[in-house]
Amino acid sequence: MDRISAIVERLARLLAILGGLVLVAVTALTVASIAGRAFTRQGLGPVPGDFELVEALTAFAVFAFLPWCQLRRGHATVDVFTRLFSERANRLIDLVCEILMTAVVVLIAWRLWHGVADKLRYHETTFILQFPLWWSYAAAFVAAAAGVVVSVYAVLQRLREFLAPAEAGPEAGDAP
């Protein structure tokens, strides 16, 4: 299991780093486009297709960050009531939530796959740059597919935690 853990960790980390680099590129593109707009009198202008590029690259970045967030249990949680539950009940809640998140990631990846096929079939392109839309869908699908792998791994981890015996806590009456 340690080798699988290392592979899943590397996959999630690599995608998160790649997503971060893409966001840096999006930031640079946005700055260049805004600066170009500010200097139109000097012969500059906005980056052609900046909105198209920002949209495509940001979509990829979001899906690239999801596996890392899933692996690190970084999704928002509300534990106002769950603190009152037993450790076993909390493990069950974690397992159920992990299964639900995996179902959502599988659904997203499945629909992205159909989106790639649809954009390929109809040869849709962006308006200004005329690059094929399936490129964006394919990049997001690859990241979402990695998210599926990480999510399934996370479900197995939560299942293992749920099936593990409860940790022994301090007995009643023991002094700290």
Image (spheres, rainbow, N blue to C red):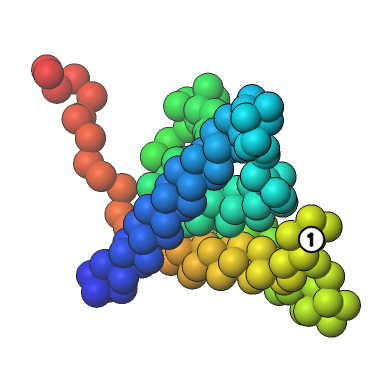
How far across and how far down the image is residue 169, in percent?
Answer: 23, 35
From this viewpoint, is residue 101 visible?
no
Picture residue at 45% right of the left edge, 27% below the top: 83
**Which residue, as the protein is rendered here, is positioned at the far bottom?**
121
**Which residue, as the protein is rendered here, is positioned at the far left?**
175
Q: Is residue 102 above or below residue 93?
A: below
Which residue is labeled 1 in the image?
A: 126
Query: What amino acid type is highlighted by mark number 1?
Result: Thr
How far across and how far down the image is residue 104, in percent?
Answer: 67, 57
**Which residue, as the protein is rendered here, is positioned at the far right?**
122
Picture residue at 26% right of the left edge, 67% below the top: 6
To which quarter of the image does residue 164 belong? Answer: bottom left
Quarter of the picture containing the N terminus is bottom left
Residue sitting nearer the eye, 70 or 35: 35
To which quarter of the image does residue 119 belong? Answer: bottom right
How far across and how far down the image is residue 90, in percent?
Answer: 46, 41
To which quarter of the image does residue 63 belong? Answer: bottom right
Q: Does 95 sit left or right of 57 as displayed?
A: left
**Which residue, as the protein is rendered here, is positioned at the far front?**
42
